[in-house]
Amino acid sequence: MATKVYETVELELLDGRTITVKPLNLKNLREVMREWSKASDGKTEDEFLDILITCTSIAFRQFAPDLAESKEELEESVDLQTMYKILEVSADIKLNDPNLVATAQELAGRI
């Protein structure tokens, strides 16, 4: 019997659709990481949100290819917390990490 070494999560999207999220294959993970590396370049919240949406869209190529094709449909199907969970499970990007939030707030206070 095979041993599963990864987490699988079922998420309900805002449109009522349910998707199963698991870690990305390496091809998609590389693409997400290339896009994620641009996150520090984002000057505004809107630019950062666009990067999150692009990363989520890349992940959806594996989970829900039809949503990956349409940015508008994707934006209507997910909220911020759902995107965070998708990126956490699929690419190990933890945006809700309390340590990360505290560090970001500390850095923002220095600017």
Image (tube, rainbow, N blue to C red):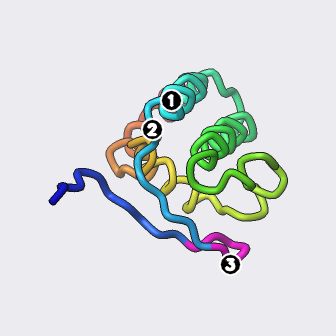
Q: Which residue is mark 3?
A: 16
CB under 8 Å between callouts 1 and 2? yes
Q: Residues within 10 Å of mark 3 (few under 14, many from 20)?
A: few
Q: Amino acid at mark 2?
A: Asn
Res 20 seen here: yes
Q: Amino acid at mark 1?
A: Lys
Nearer to me, 101 or 30: 30
Q: Residues within 10 Å of mark 2 (few under 14, many from 20)?
A: few
Label 1 secondary element: helix
Name the residue at 84% across, 53% down: 72
Q: Which residue is mark 1?
A: 27
Q: CA distance from mark 1 to mark 3?
A: 28 Å
Q: Quadrant of the N terminus?
A: bottom left
Q: Which secondary structure dominates the residues rendered in magenta?
A: loop
Nearer to me, 74 or 45: 74
Q: CA distance from mark 1 to mark 2?
A: 6 Å
Q: Is residue 55 left or right of residue 101?
A: right
Nearer to me, 64 or 77: 64
Residue 8: x and y, percent?
A: 37, 61
Residue 93: x and y, percent?
A: 43, 41
Q: Is residue 16 left or right of residue 7?
A: right
Q: Quadrant of the C terminus?
A: top right
Q: Which residue is mark 2?
A: 25
Name the residue at 68% across, 44% down: 53
Label 2 secondary element: loop
Dot label at residue 43: none
Res 101 seen here: no
Q: Nearer the viewer, mark 1 or mark 3?
A: 1
Q: Amino acid at mark 3?
A: Gly
Span colored in magenta: 12-17
